[in-house]
Image (spheres, rainbow, N blue to C red):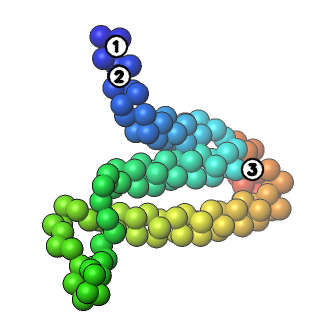
Amino acid sequence: MVDAVFDFVIGHFNTVAYIILMMIGFYAMTGKTNLVKKLVGLNIFQWSIILFIVSLSAKRDATIPIVLAGPDHVTGPVLDAADYVNPLPHVLMLTAIVVGVAITGVALALLLRIHRQYGTLEEDELRDRVRASG
């Protein structure tokens, strides 16, 4: 039984690593009270999902989906659709990276504004100070 679990973990090392990263990010988002730590957890969670999807879309012995020119520079080798890498997951994850960087930038600007206004980034202290000022 132990050997089967060990073989599975070694055989699917990248998947196990991404799941561990995902759980670390999820714990940081839900278990921490500092807003910066929550933002770092969000980034770890997001990057684990991006890496997981890109690794799932990887394909051995496949080529890029561009028509390759043959010796006569007109036609290339005839390939089936299974011989090509699907570019859609990579393009979607590139978009997710751009959106994630933008979200991180906006969140950092908001955290800076919150810290200037209330002097802390701890949730409990912020809740007390907002109630006291409002």
Residue 39 in view (yes/no): yes
Which badge, 3 or 2, is on the more N-terminal residue?
A: 2
Does dot 3 land on a helix, a strand or a loop? loop
Foreground mark, 3 or 2, reads 2
Residue 130 image point, x, y percent: 72, 54
Question: What residue would you read off at disc 3?
Answer: 121
Q: Residue at x 54, y 70 (%)?
A: 98
What's the CA distance linking mark 1 and mark 2? 6 Å
Asked whether 125 or 121 is in front, the reply is 121
Q: Amino acid at mark 2?
A: Asp
The residue singled out by tag 1 in the image is 3
Front residue of this view, candidates 21 and 4: 4
Mark 3 vs mark 2, CA separation in Å: 44 Å
**Percent coordinates x, y for residue 96 in the rendering:** 47, 65
Q: Are marks 1 and 2 in contact (CB under 8 Å)?
A: yes
Q: Residue beneath label 2, please?
A: 7
